[in-house]
Image (spheres, coloured by chain):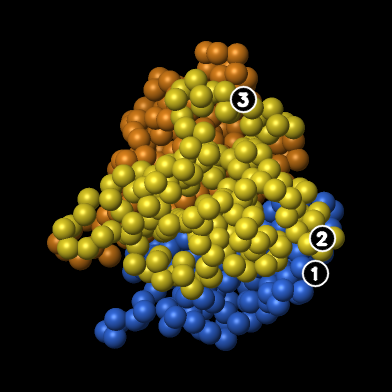
Chain colours: A orange, B blue, C yellow
Amino acid sequence: MSNGTAVEKASIIVMSGDMDKVMGAFIIANGAAAFDMKVTMFFTFWGIKAIQKGNLTGTSLMGKMLGVMNRGGLDAIGPSRLNMGGMGRWMFKKMMKKNNVMPLSALVKQAQEQGVRLIACDMSMNVMEIAKTDLIDGVEVGGVATFIAEASESKFSLFI
Amino acid sequence: MSNGTAVEKASIIVMSGDMDKVMGAFIIANGAAAFDMKVTMFFTFWGIKAIQKGNLTGTSLMGKMLGVMNRGGLDAIGPSRLNMGGMGRWMFKKMMKKNNVMPLSALVKQAQEQGVRLIACDMSMNVMEIAKTDLIDGVEVGGVATFIAEASESKFSLFI
Amino acid sequence: MSNGTAVEKASIIVMSGDMDKVMGAFIIANGAAAFDMKVTMFFTFWGIKAIQKGNLTGTSLMGKMLGVMNRGGLDAIGPSRLNMGGMGRWMFKKMMKKNNVMPLSALVKQAQEQGVRLIACDMSMNVMEIAKTDLIDGVEVGGVATFIAEASESKFSLFI
């Protein structure tokens, strides 16, 4: 898909923390990277969970409460519908495995191996009291200006 | 809006199965098609419901459970808020009728008549055990690569 | 980011009425405007709440019910998760204040001061029985064609 003169770009903001939407984001990102596009994913608010290690986060009482509710990182992410106390997540994982769909952790790993740029939103990290050490290796921290600069040069930009 | 030399494109991924979001997707798609844009809609996960016939789907126990919960196709879709056991859906339909807003089924028909390309995500169909015969006529089945190719050439791409 | 020959554009549809998503929309819009981009925000369905004065709206019984459920404008908006009867909203506001994140009302004001074009969807206003006088000053009323025209000329378009 490259025109031979410049690298084509794609940008994705991930604000959702729902398993199905986060998986969709990575499937699109990995697909675009497979077409030699330079993909940037910008994780904000609930989306940051997808690139967290899963440890408890937060220092203030409120930050810790948010950390407890949000703990587990991507292994604890449930779908946006039919979660039913974790059952939706279990069912989805089982059905995906049966159909050879990569689990979320493998999709994240594949994205990193393909050079997809993963950026955590600095403002969200401050508000939610998430430290850089709470994030998986290889993730950058950046601001909205970084996203806008990338999106302005992208063939397509998505908000997920 | 055409520059006289090439057809302008627009791409929309529909992952949501909420009535208001699906309607928004079709209103945008039909609007763009009215401007002579070549529009591709790519339906994935819950969004596939909008282009299903409404019959029960699934073969495995889990697939059937998902089919029961998701049955009815677009006639059974409720809004993302205020659904209140179907009342939000009824209220919305009544208010829309009073204000001459097309029902969802008419929006889908109009999209097809205007040449909007409707593609169901093959991976989602496998995971959710939805067969091609469960989809309304005229829908293609395709992969994420098809979406990325279209989005890369589009004037705008949206994730809904 | 301007190329010296033309103003660069960005377009954002806001259909969500969740505080976190609406804030994200304004943070992106204000960021893009700070880069001298010409930004258009198109508010539809639940998103219109973000540009309402907060008075009760609606004339029919159903319109009034929707008005009661939706009253308060942007000051009453809660996040998409962890709302817990308003507590999530209170917690978020407190954490954002501590971290010097602008409240939503200030983000809207900043957008208007930076020349971000705020458009309320006419079809949604009809269906939800919201009048132009229910909207904050400086908001335009427009149709989906206006959004499509702007999006077709935009460096990036987002659906939030």
> Which residue is under mark 3?
C91
Q: Position of residue A53 (x, y in %)?
A: 48, 25
In percent of the image, x 55 and y 57: which residue is there? Answer: C43
Where residue B64 sits, quadrant-wise, is bottom right
Q: Secondary structure at mark 3?
A: helix
Where residue B126 sits, quadrant-wise, is bottom right
Which mark lies nearer to you, 3 or 2? 2
Indicate the chain on which mark 2 is placed: C
In percent of the image, x 59 and y 54: which residue is there? Answer: C135
Label 3, label 2: how far apart the Cα atoms are: 32 Å
Q: Considering the image in quadrants, where does the N terminus of chain A appear?
A: bottom left
> Which residue is under mark 1?
B94
Circle count = 3
Q: Position of residue C87 (x, y in %)?
A: 69, 27
> Which residue is under mark 2?
C62
Say left or right for A25 vs C30. right
